[in-house]
Image: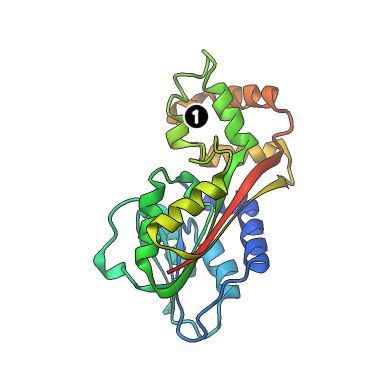
Amino acid sequence: MEDPKEYVKINEMTRRDAKEVLEKIPIKWKKVDARVLDIGCGDGGVTSNILKKYMPENFKKLVGCDKNIECVKYAQEHYGNEKVHFMALDVEEKIPDELKETFDHIFSSYAFNWIRKQEIAFTNVYDMLTEGGNCQLLFVGHSNAFQVFDDLSRTPKWRSHLENVHTKFTSPYFHSQDPAGEIQTMMKRIGFKDIDVRATRETYAYEDGVEMFKSVMKCLNPFQSLEENWEEFMSDALALDPDLGIVKYVLIVACGSK
């Protein structure tokens, strides 16, 4: 996702799931002076317009982070203030020492399905939490969108364009038969307590059907070579699955405390 202004227009599914998860699985907030981190904040809309509404009003600070510098600049310009701040951070890499044991709560919405180094990222979450702090991370496992890209990656026509589909696009848990079990085992190994990992089958119907799906995929598309052949590629994708206007996916919610 390169253009945060475009992402604002198409991330309704992310906003819906963030709201539903925060309502169905309430975070045990620190009552006073909570310090909160949102990993993969994107344009900052979910951070400021959704997550913030579920936090205690007397929180100390809310930080959104993303490895995309343009997203950070956009979020800071539109939502930054004395208590809400946005910064660049790649949670798959070594984190600065000053961030360790800094946050009482860590949230993330639709970022961890892009992360390849899962254990490093989860370990960084653990290290950034204060003692007794908790995390709530929601992301996608399997989806029919991932499936179509995977299927097309095995065709002679699109193979060269999608040769890195499993490292650049599909979720690390795309092929997993038990993503919740895998993640729970990993979190336990890292040291998390009070672990609760759920994987549920969900659907989301885009208001404008396949046209919105095409817009979403174009915004998220990491394959530059597809850009000049985008309409043809989407035509082949829809030939495989004409119902792509309805996303069918596994939503993973991973919670734990330190």
- Comparing 24 with 218, the one in front is 24
- Comparing 152 with 44, the one in front is 152
What percent of the width, then of the height, locates residue 63? 42, 69
What percent of the width, then of the height, locates residue 113? 50, 46
- Comparing 188 with 220, the one in front is 188
Q: Is 106 situated above or below 227?
A: below
Q: Is residue 94 left or right of residue 231?
A: left
Q: Is residue 67 something that shows in the picture? A: no
- What's the amino acid at mark 1? Glu
Q: Residue at x 56, y 68 (%)?
A: 51
Q: Is residue 113 something that shows in the picture? A: yes
From this viewpoint, which residue is outermost toward the left?
97
Q: Residue at x 62, y 71 (%)?
A: 26
Q: Is residue 159 left or right of residue 207?
A: left
Q: Residue at x 56, y 29 (%)?
A: 149
Q: Where does label 1 land, which residue?
A: 227
